[in-house]
Amino acid sequence: MKLLEDMITRYGKIGDGGVLKVDGFLNHQIDVGLVDRLGEEFYRIFGDCDITKILTVEASGIGIACLTARYFRVPVLFAKKSKTVNLSGDVYSAPVFSFTHKKNYEIVVSKEFLTAGDRVLIIDDFLAMGSSIEGLRSIIQSAGAALAGAGIVIEKAFQPGGAKLRSEGVRIESLARIAELNPKTGVVFAK
Amino acid sequence: MKLLEDMITRYGKIGDGGVLKVDGFLNHQIDVGLVDRLGEEFYRIFGDCDITKILTVEASGIGIACLTARYFRVPVLFAKKSKTVNLSGDVYSAPVFSFTHKKNYEIVVSKEFLTAGDRVLIIDDFLAMGSSIEGLRSIIQSAGAALAGAGIVIEKAFQPGGAKLRSEGVRIESLARIAELNPKTGVVFAK
């Protein structure tokens, strides 16, 4: 998506260790007009898939998921990163390894809100190693629900998550696919 | 706001220790159509305040803030609960005590995205003791920005946060104000 690639080129910053910082418009400050356009694009791609629920993980996926869900007219469900006293009853859980924070954590979803009749679209800001998508897929499977696909804003195509998930039959649609993060020459997008 | 009060009456659950669970439509599963209406209402209230930025705290404030910001056509900035490697450069920080999780944590905002020219609207899901609003206010003050007010979805009016902040001159507008959470008779709204 050209608009998104232009934003990444203009405002993205390449940090140490292959980190792409997009905290100016995506995951700290949120350019709501831009993200609304991303949501519209996800609807163009997945709008005929009979989606009943959009699933994401806190925190940076939530805004994108909500602005996308307006187009689908379905609820958002966001997995929480720890079990809190405000999550009632039984939960589905799955382990996720965060390469950003270099630690394992559990993501949890209340069983009450994900059921066998659901057709789920996963929305997330980044796809790199694929750990959080795998965790969400595991939760969807535990609920007996169907995974219609995953809409990703930025895929680091030089990392193996996207290829692995696609080889396992998951439909992954990324609005920007990055082939290389070069501290000298900048962001190179995949063809 | 009658629509919101009806949702709380119908789907809210009163838990132990004065907890009101609204995870079916507000802070785990999100009824995006409802929250979009809440955003429209915040715009009706604060639309003439020359807001330049909407500030919230991860995670449950983010969806509400994004759907509200669409009406204002301004960016959302969400304070993070810990300093991560993806937050670049200097940050403003403030301590917040979570009565839900019974622990202290720091909230941080990158200095890059909050400046002296900003007129800030705080958006959050709950107001009870007021600790997170106080933390956000402290960050706004540190940036030299102006706090235009706080738009709250659910205020627990039987707890002191709202009264304290109002007495200190903060404009607080809550869409539902709860006078009592009675495990036997249910939710009683303030007049």
Image (cartoon, coloured by chain):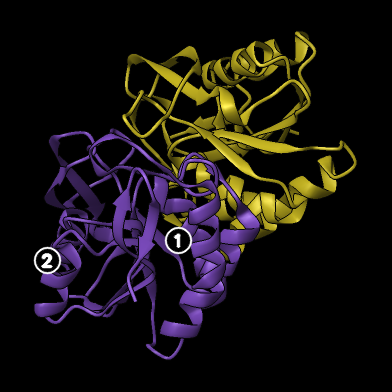
Chain colours: A purple, B yellow
In the rendered structure, the answer to whether residue A36 lies left or right of residue A104 reads right
In the image shown, does B168 or A68 lie closer to the viewer? Answer: A68
**Amino acid type of disc 1?**
Ala
State the residue at coordinates (25%, 41%).
A81
Q: Position of residue B161 (x, y in %)?
A: 61, 16
For mark 2, give the secondary structure. helix
In the rendered structure, the answer to whether residue B162 lies left or right of residue A120 reads right
Disc 1 vs disc 2: Cβ atoms closer than 8 Å?
Answer: no
Whether residue B28 is visible: no
Q: Position of residue A51 (x, y in %)?
A: 38, 80
In the image shown, does A147 or A30 lie closer to the viewer? Answer: A30
Label 1 marks a residue whose chain is: A
Label 2 marks a residue whose chain is: A
In the rendered structure, the answer to whether residue A1 lies left or right of residue B5 reads left
In the rendered structure, the answer to whether residue B150 lies left or right of residue B134 reads right
Marks 1 and 2 sit apart, C-alpha to C-alpha, by 21 Å
State the residue at coordinates (60%, 51%).
A31
In the image shown, does A56 or B184 lie closer to the viewer? Answer: A56
Specify the quadrant of the image occupied by residue B141. Answer: top right
Pointer 2 residue: A142
**Vertical placement of residue A146 versus B131, above or below:** below
Badge 1 crowding class, 10 Å Cα cut-off, few under 14, some 14 to 19, many 20 or more, is many
In the image shown, does A187 or A77 lie closer to the viewer? Answer: A187
Q: Earlier in the sequence, mark 1 or mark 2?
A: 1
State the residue at coordinates (49%, 55%).
A9
**Amino acid type of disc 2?**
Ser
State the residue at coordinates (79%, 48%).
B43
Pointer 1 residue: A65
